[in-house]
Amino acid sequence: MTQAYLPRHADAALALACAQHPVVILDGPRGVGKTTSARRLAASTLEFPRDLPRIQADPQRALAALETPVLIDEWQVAGTDLMWAIKRLVDDRPGPGQFILTGSVEPATYGPTYPLTGRSVLVVMRPMTVMEREGRGAQVTPLERWVTGQEPPASAGSAGTFTVADLFRTGFPGALALPHSAAFLEGYAAVLAQRAGDEGRDASRLLRTLQVLATLEGQATPQTTVWEAADITKVTWSAYDGLLRRTHITVPSPSWESNRLKRLTSYPKRYLADAALAAVLAGETEASLRANPHVAGRYVESLVMQQLRPQVDAMKGTMGHVRTANGQREVDAVIDLGRQVWGVEVKSATSVTPHDARALEWFREQMGERFGGGLVVHTGGDSYPLGERIWAVSLDALTGTV
C-alpha cells in the first residue's frame, strides 16, 4: 500500500519555479523527500546511476526525446557533461518547466554548476516540520499569518503538548514510522561521514566533527573551538565545513548586520539541520536532557529553528542572529523579510514574562519602524502579548498545532 503524500512547505515554491524557469535545482540534505516531491510534477524520470547508460552516448539527444518536465535524480552522478547538455537544450528551446534536478550537491571538484547560470533557480527542501509530519504542510504557516497582520491567538490555561521526547522526533521522512529514531540517525551520520571518504578524507574524523558540532548546537563559537575539539587541522575543518554546508547538514545562522547596530560579534550560531540528529550525535537521551534543562534548552532552540526555516523560506526571507560583542544583548534569531525584520527568542519554559522579552524590546528600539514583531517561543501552552508588537508564543502555536 502506497503511503499518502505528506505536503511540504516547499511544494508551492517548487511548482512556481517550474512554471517560471527552464531548470529547477531542488536541493537539501539527503533523505528529506526531494525526489518524492519532484516526482509529482515530472512527466519523465531518470534515476542515476540506473539510467546513466541511456544518456552517456549523446546526452543532449537522449534528454530532448523525453517529455518535460524531466526529473533527473542524483544528477551529480553524471558529471558536468550533463550540465552542458542541459544548457544547450534550454538555449535551443527556451521555456519554463523543462528539468528538475534532485540529489546530493555536487562534489567540490565539480566547481559551481556554472553552465546553468541564468537558466536555473534553486529551491531548498529541509527536514520536515511538525506541520509537515502531520500532513499540514500545504497550509498557510503561522509565521506568514503573523507577518501579514494576524496576531498570534491569545489563550489562557492551555496545556502545551511539548515533551522532551519531541526533541528526538526527526524530520527525515524515512524514520517517521519508526518508534525510535536514534539508530536511524546514527546510520544516517555514518553515511554522511562516508562522503568524506569519497572525497579522499578520513570518514571517522568527519563523524567526530559532526559530534562536536552537535554538542555546540545553538551556540555562537569561533571556528578554532570546532577544529580543536575535533582534533583536526584548520585546513581539514575548512574542507569539512564546506562539505557539510553544501549538503545542508549544517545550517549556520550568520551574524545579522544592520547599520543601526554596532559592535556585533561576527561568530555564527551553529545548528545541524535536524534537532533530533543533533541530540543523538551529541550523545544525549531523554533522561539526560530531563536531568539537565540548560542543555535541553539548546535542542529546544534547535527544534524551533527547524520549524522556522521552511516558513521563512516560503516568504523568501533570511535568518541570522544578533549578539553584541560584550554579550549583553542577544536575539536568538532575526528574520529578515526586506522591509521588515522580526526577532525571535526561545525559552525552554512553560511560561514567560515581559522580563524574557528584554532583548526583543532592545531590538525593537534599534530597528524602529522596520521592526515587524517579536516572538518569545516557549514550551508551554499559552500565547499572549508581552508588549508593543511582542508576543509570547507557544511551540504549539508556532507549529500550527493550535
Image (cartoon, rainbow, N blue to C red):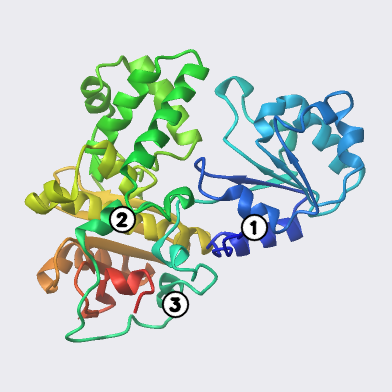
Which tag, 3 or 2, sits closer to the chain's start? 3
Tell me if mark 3 has few (under 14), some (14-19) or many (20+) residues whose alpha carbon lies within 10 angstroms of its own.
few
Query: SS class of the residue under badge 3?
Result: helix
Residue in front for this viewpoint, 132 or 260: 132
Which tag, 2 or 1, sits closer to the chain's start? 1
Which tag, 3 or 1, sits closer to the chain's start? 1
Q: Amino acid at mark 1?
A: Leu
Q: Amino acid at mark 2?
A: Leu
**x 48%, y 48%: residue:** 174
Tell me if mark 1 has few (under 14), some (14-19) or many (20+) residues whose alpha carbon lies within 10 angstroms of its own.
many
3 and 1 marks in contact (CB < 8 Å): no
Seen in the picture, residue 23 relative to 344 is either above or below; the reply is above
Residue in front for this viewpoint, 156 or 365: 156
- The residue singled out by tag 1 in the image is 14
Tell me if mark 2 has few (under 14), some (14-19) or many (20+) residues whose alpha carbon lies within 10 angstroms of its own.
many
Q: Quadrant of residue 385?
A: bottom left
- The residue singled out by tag 2 in the image is 303
Q: Quadrant of residue 119?
A: top right
2 and 1 marks in contact (CB < 8 Å): no
- The residue singled out by tag 3 in the image is 145
